[in-house]
Amino acid sequence: MMRFMFRRNFKILRWFIFVGGILGFLYFSFGIFVGMSSGDAIRNSQKILDDFKRTASFIDTFKKSNLRLPTQAEIEIQFGENYSISITDFHDIEKPKFLMLKPADSYILHYWRGEWAEYYAGWNQQTTLSIKESDYYPFHSPILAVIVVIASLLICFIGFKLKSDASKTLLF
């Protein structure tokens, strides 16, 4: 009876190791692929960041001369009708952590990307944009992601080896 339970538990363990290695390999390989193909996303994010900075410069100048923030209509007069960037006050949405301590006389810029919003803090120039290539890799490091993929393959091999070696023993 004890021998049967050991065989059954060992069989389950080796399949978990094998399947876990395969799933880890697939997941992190996909992460490396996403990171390697992030060039267009980074260029688009850099363009949005440039627009944020240009808008922030206009708002700061406007605020100094008028002692108030501009309205969306005044921003659109400066940058064109239906301008994508606006000043937001965060009603009914969750704030990113770096935007929590907004000074009373400052502003937060908002850009809607179609599925989610990007933000820019006027008082500290922080943004929610991902403009570094490392932001697109698992663990924020292409080298570490490759190491994990190799480790996943080794785990998969160990699980496969346990499976093939176990078929040669008397226990299975």
Image (spheres, rainbow, N blue to C red):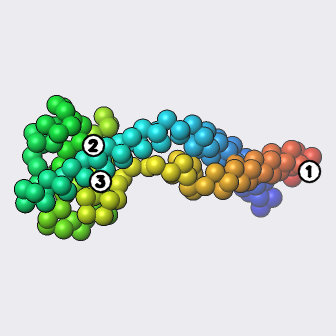
Q: Secondary structure at mark 2?
A: strand
Q: Which residue is mark 1?
A: 169
Q: Nearer the viewer, residue 94 or 14?
A: 94
As drawn, the residue found furthest toward the front would be: 65
Which residue is located at x 41 percent, y 43 percent? 45
x%, y% of residue 66?
7, 56
x%, y% of residue 119?
29, 51
Q: Earlier in the sequence, mark 1 or mark 2?
A: 2
Q: Which residue is mark 3?
A: 120
Question: Is residue 94 among the parts visible in the rendering?
Answer: no
For residue 107, which quarter of the picture? Answer: bottom left
Q: Kindly indicate whether the residue at mark 2 contacts the one at mark 1 (C-beta within 8 angstroms).
A: no
Closer to the eye: label 1 or 2? 2
- What's the CA distance linking mark 3 and mark 1? 63 Å
Q: Kindly indicate whether the residue at mark 3 contacts the one at mark 2 (C-beta within 8 angstroms).
A: yes
Question: Is residue 35 among the parts visible in the rendering?
Answer: yes
x%, y% of residue 116?
31, 42
Left or right, 143 with reference to 110 = right
Q: Kindly indicate whether the residue at mark 1 contacts the one at mark 3 (C-beta within 8 angstroms).
A: no
Q: Earlier in the sequence, mark 3 or mark 1?
A: 3
Q: Earlier in the sequence, mark 2 or mark 3?
A: 2
Which residue is located at x 36 percent, y 53 percent? 128
- Going by the numbered disc 2, the residue's amino acid type is Tyr
Q: Secondary structure at mark 3?
A: strand
